[in-house]
Image (spheres, rainbow, N blue to C red):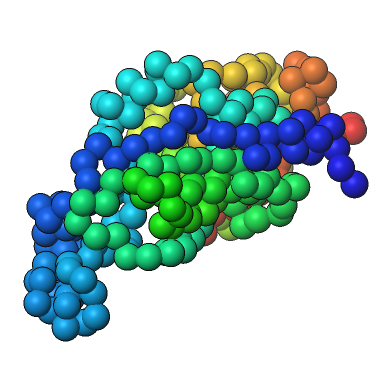
Amino acid sequence: MSTALDDQLANFVGASTGPVTTSPHPVNTPMIRHWVEAMDDHNPVYVDEEAARAAGYDGVIAPATMLQAWIMRGLRASQAAAEQRGGSAMDEVMALLDEHGYTSVVATNCDQHYERSLVLGDELSVTSVIDSISGEKETGLGVGRFVTTRMEFSDATGALVATMLFRILKFRPRPKVEPSAPRMLRPRPALTQDNEFFFAGAKEGKLLIQRCMDCGVLRHPPRPTCARCQSYEWDTVVSTGRGVIYSFVVNHYPQVPAFDYPLIVALVELEEGTRLVANVDGFTPDTIAIGQAVEAEFVAFDDDLTLPVFRPVER
Ligand code: ZN
């Protein structure tokens, strides 16, 4: 089935892509010598008259693959010529394909056919037309259309010496898929001999509260001395894990990769009377409320970090 774009593109097939271009210099020895040097081509027929004649030629011949080199004018001259002549049929085709989302381009094929070997003194001219524009094709790079240009090289007498088909693919680039980054680990708690018990307890599924061994007062966050009696002696009790939301904040920024945002950070008041800052689950910023009953569950965020997370409960 042909689309409106197919029909539009079909109008360009056979259109010239620019004026006849002539070689700035006739086929010549210095350029051939540079070419064979650069290509490391040791065939003597390109540089040695005797060898060329021995091979059946009238004299040295140009390497066939130099074809395009003879009509290349250099970057500045080519740009100036393009500016002078304005938009070509090829420019229009490219713009049309861009408009339809085929914004990327890659060269795919170059086929050259030689009618005869080029010899010293040959003066070339070349015409270029749009040979074909394919329908939409699925390719490894994405959906696209192949645009083939046909260049015909003639000598000074107008005789065809070579033909070149040059094909590009104009395609719709696939959206870039970011590789999914491994989830960052949560920041580690800074462990001290005063707070290490809390995280060790969490790993065992226990919510531990520090208790003064002299006066029995509970305290959190962990610290070395009792605020009431200044005793250094302490042990722990296991909390029921039940409490209420005493307060909370919803953090939007700055964002740390290990967390999901908006991030609710709650201050939970435990049944035992101490409060702790903790994560919650099962709430949204709209449903969490001060006074809401919660209960701790233990979540292993990674091999090394288990923390209490408070979830809403009916009470
Ligand atoms: Zn005490």
Decide if residue 45 is in sight here: yes
Residue 313 placement (x, y as % from top left): 84, 35
* Left or right of residue 73, residue 227 in this image: right
Q: Residue at x 29, y 40 (%)?
A: 23
* Left or right of residue 31, residue 10 in this image: right
Residue 87 placement (x, y as % from top left): 52, 20
The one nearer the camera, 216 or 314, is 314
The one nearer the camera, 239 or 62, is 62
Decide if residue 186 is in sight here: no
Q: Looking at the image, which residue sits at the far bottom? A: 54
Residue 96 placement (x, y as % from top left): 66, 27
The one nearer the camera, 84 or 173, is 84
Q: Residue at x 42, y 43 (%)?
A: 126
Asked if 203 appears above or below 174 in the picture, the reply is below
Residue 279's image quarter?
Answer: top right
Asked if 87 appears above or below 136 in the picture, the reply is above
* Left or right of residue 19, residue 143 in this image: right
* Left or right of residue 51, residue 124 in this image: right
Q: Residue at x 17, y 69 (%)?
A: 59
Asked if 155 appears above or below 311 in the picture, the reply is below
Q: Residue at x 65, y 55 (%)?
A: 139
Residue 79 placement (x, y as % from top left): 34, 25
Q: Looking at the image, which residue sits at the far front? A: 157
The C terminus - image quarter = top right
